[in-house]
Image: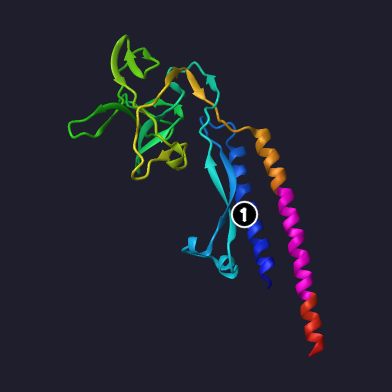
Amino acid sequence: MSHAIYMAYSGLRSRAQALEILTNNLANARSTAFKGEGTYFQVMERLERPQMDALEQAINGPSVEARGRTNFRQGTPEKTGNPLDLAISGDGFFVVMSERGVRYTRNGAFQLKEDGQLVNAFGHAVLSDQKGPGGEPRPVVVPPGEIHISPNGQVSVDGIASATLKVVSFGDPHKLLREGSSLFAAPDGVNEVPPARTEILQGYLEGSNVDPLTSVTGMIQLMRSFEMLTQTIRSLTREVDQRVINEVGKV
């Protein structure tokens, strides 16, 4: 098969990867605090791919792959009236303890366990800015009573302060690793910094920052590009088949 056909297939694969990213954006257009991904295409040299699949091995040169880059633009705060619903206005992330360790999220749909521990929708403990005797992060525990959370994250019950939510930021949030359940992980070397211009909104949830119209428009453009590449492959395949027929006929 000709090199041109392999390259065209590489283009098809990259469009399929980009389409998957846009489809995920669209599926989460109403998910709390979801951060959509922008798509871009990257030319990958053979030396940059330590593990190559069959298509990459067949391409004697660079290939194209689609990549996603998280858009951390703030979503619109939506009023719920629930005192345990919190939205961050400005920079920063809430900090939770998941099964895999400390994680970061903008999703402030919190609830209380029977023991008064504040958790997110997936049962992960929400952390305070206080540390335990061994320096370990301490979860937020709320006693019974009327809960008030101030713009700086201080949690008070019946007028008595009980904890302060830990809210952190990062110099470059794009270095965070995206996980499921609205969580992000900080790889080694990516450190927390105090957030700037941050305010906690009680009784609000941050909406998704995905624009459905933009996502649909991007999907349409990708589908058109996909169709053009498909037609190119068909044309190249016919040329190869005709060449083979001609060569065989001369034997």
x%, y% of residue 173?
A: 44, 36
Q: Quadrant of residue 13?
A: bottom right
Quarter containing the C terminus:
bottom right
Q: Most extreme residue toward the bottom, as rendered?
A: 251
Residue 226 vertical placement versus 131 (above, below)? below
Q: Classify 10 Å Cα crowding around label 1: few (below 14), some (14-19), many (20 and above).
A: many
Quarter containing the N terminus:
bottom right
Magenta-drawn stretch contains 162? no
Number of numbered discs present?
Answer: 1
Q: Quadrant of residue 185?
A: top left
Residue type for callout 1: Ser
Work out whether residue 136 or residue 247 is closer to the camera in this orientation and state it.
247
Residue 143 vertical placement versus 172 (above, below)? above
x%, y% of residue 204?
A: 49, 20
The secondary element bearing badge 1 is classed as helix
Q: Most extreme residue toward the left, as rendered?
A: 133
> What residue appears at the point 46 percent right and 30 percent down from the top-left corner?
107
Residue 81 vertical placement versus 219 (above, below)? above
> What residue appears at the point 43 percent right and 33 percent down from the top-left corner?
105
Query: Residues in magenta?
Result: 223-241
x%, y% of residue 228?
A: 75, 55
Work out whether residue 141 or residue 14 is closer to the camera in this orientation and state it.
14
Magenta-drawn stretch contains 232? yes
**Which residue does the numbered mark 1 point to in the structure image?**
14
- Is 182 displayed left or right of 97 in the figure? right
x%, y% of residue 125?
A: 34, 32
**Main secondary structure along the magenta-highlighted residues:** helix
